[in-house]
Amino acid sequence: MGCWGIKSYDNDDAHEALDRGFERVHGEVYDDLMDDRNPLTLEQVQRKLASPETLAAALDLFLDEAGSDRGLWDDLDRLGYAGIVVRHAELDVPIPAEAMASAIQFLEAEDMDWGEDATKRGLRREKELALLRRSAAG
């Protein structure tokens, strides 16, 4: 499936777009912070560098890979898009209304088989939806 965890951004497509988006915006600064010798965690690096520009870059890179026709996206594509938005919302980045609405729609309609992690993913999805709805309202 390309997922290694229950968070919407714990999948190959979202992870790749997030990484490349941060790199596109911050270049060598991001590379230096991600160096194994740097004591900062990924969470700390992303919290330090996340911005509307990293969100826009990650979504742009994601659309380059998934295609701009959302009607052709599969469940994993929709999850990846939502994951990029969720991750930036967790990092307190303001989310444009259109991206927010799409992410909420994709999460509400999620219909993936999570196997033994179905309950955990359901709880996590509700947490992500609550975060996005609070962010949209606030």
Image (cartoon, rainbow, N blue to C red):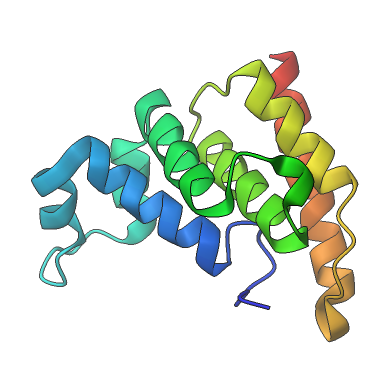
> In the picture provided, is 19 more to the left or to the right than 62?
left
Residue at screen point 78% across, 36% down: 104
Residue 34 or residue 28, whichever sits in front: 28
The answer to whether residue 130 is visible is no
Residue 81 or residue 121, whichever sits in front: 81
Q: Residue furthest top?
A: 138
Residue 66 position, x and y percent, is 58, 52
Quadrant in the picture for the C terminus: top right
Quadrant of the rendered image containing residue 123 = bottom right
- Does 118 sit above or below residue 22? below
Residue 105 position, x and y percent, is 83, 37
- Does 114 sit above or below residue 50? below
- Does 61 sit above or below residue 118? above
Quadrant of the rendered image containing residue 131 = top right
Residue at screen point 77% across, 60% down: 75
> In the picture provided, is 15 more to the left or to the right than 24?
right
Residue 134 or residue 62, whichever sits in front: 62
Residue at screen point 31% across, 61% down: 41
The answer to whether residue 44 is visible is yes
> In the picture provided, is 15 more to the left or to the right than 37?
right
Q: Residue furthest bottom?
A: 116
Quadrant of the rendered image containing residue 136 = top right
Tell how many labels. Answer: 0
Quadrant in the picture for the N terminus: bottom right
> In the picture provided, is 59 more to the left or to the right than 2?
left
Residue 22 position, x and y percent, is 31, 44
Residue at screen point 35% across, 44% down: 21
Residue 35 position, x and y percent, is 14, 65
